[in-house]
Amino acid sequence: MMANVQTQTPKEMLDFLLPKDSPLFRRWMDKAVADGRRKSAASAGKTAQDLEWQLHSAQLRETLGISVSSKIWTGKATFQGLGLGLTDRVQDALDVTAAKILSRKAKNTSETLMNTVLDVSQSIARGTFTKQSGVHPCFTTSSELYSYREDRVILGVEMLAILGYPRDMIIPEDFTNRQLKRLAGNTISLPCLGMMLWSFQVMRRRNFEAPDMGGN
């Protein structure tokens, strides 16, 4: 028996995250933490890219009215950033994005921040994080997603679940979290593909009236 889709509400992205006490979470988070440590070690030393993100950060911080040393998020005593490679650039992205959201002239900005997912692999100038509509930009093969609510990285296995893959999907034991994230950024699940094809077939059979341009 099929559920009436009209009575269903879309799931939020964070609804697909694993509970922290599950064995699957512990297994993949251990791998994510190892990936993060390797990334932090590999990024040591100043490069031209460092100067570029620092320039973007300084410009955004000036616009937001915060100092270059402000750590509005990562300076909290409770901050962990579990599973992330906590380089200076990544921490800066977390702080600038938090400041940007909290500075909005809207209600419940703190709640909005808690529901935000930031892709720290992208430049802060791009603003690759959850939009006010609740829509998140597409995954890429380099996506490194951070949940402000959970204060941790979103695991590769969770990214696949968000895309529609089943939780009981068999994954080789020697797969790393990084490999799974790359897979999530370069794939589409069969249910999603089927829905796209079905929607295309429905829409192509509809008759759309041409807009009245006010002429003959």
Image: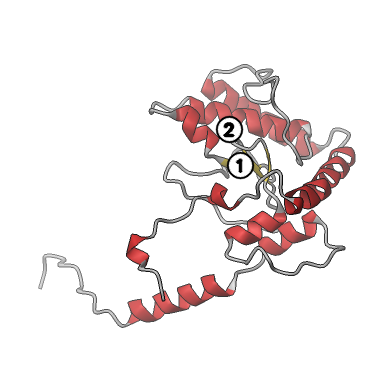
Pointer 1 and pointer 2: residues touching (CB < 8 Å)? Answer: yes
Query: Looking at the image, is mark 1 or mark 2 earlier in the sequence?
Result: 2
Residue receiving disc 1? 118
Give residue 77's position: percent from left, percent from top.
70, 19
Residue receiving disc 2? 97
Q: Nearer the viewer, residue 36 or 120?
A: 36
Q: How many marks?
A: 2
Crowdedness near tag 1: few (<14), some (14–19) or many (≥20) residues, C-alpha within 10 Å: many
Q: Nearer the viewer, residue 210 or 4?
A: 4
Give residue 69's position: percent from left, percent from top.
69, 18
Q: CA distance from mark 1 to mark 2?
A: 8 Å
Q: Amino acid at mark 2?
A: Thr
* Image quadrant where residue 152 sits: top right
* Image quadrant where residue 97 sits: top right
2 relative to 126 in the view: left or right = left
Crowdedness near tag 2: few (<14), some (14–19) or many (≥20) residues, C-alpha within 10 Å: many
82 relative to 19 in the view: left or right = right
Quarter of the picture containing the C terminus is bottom left
Position of residue 56 relative to residue 121, above or below, is: above
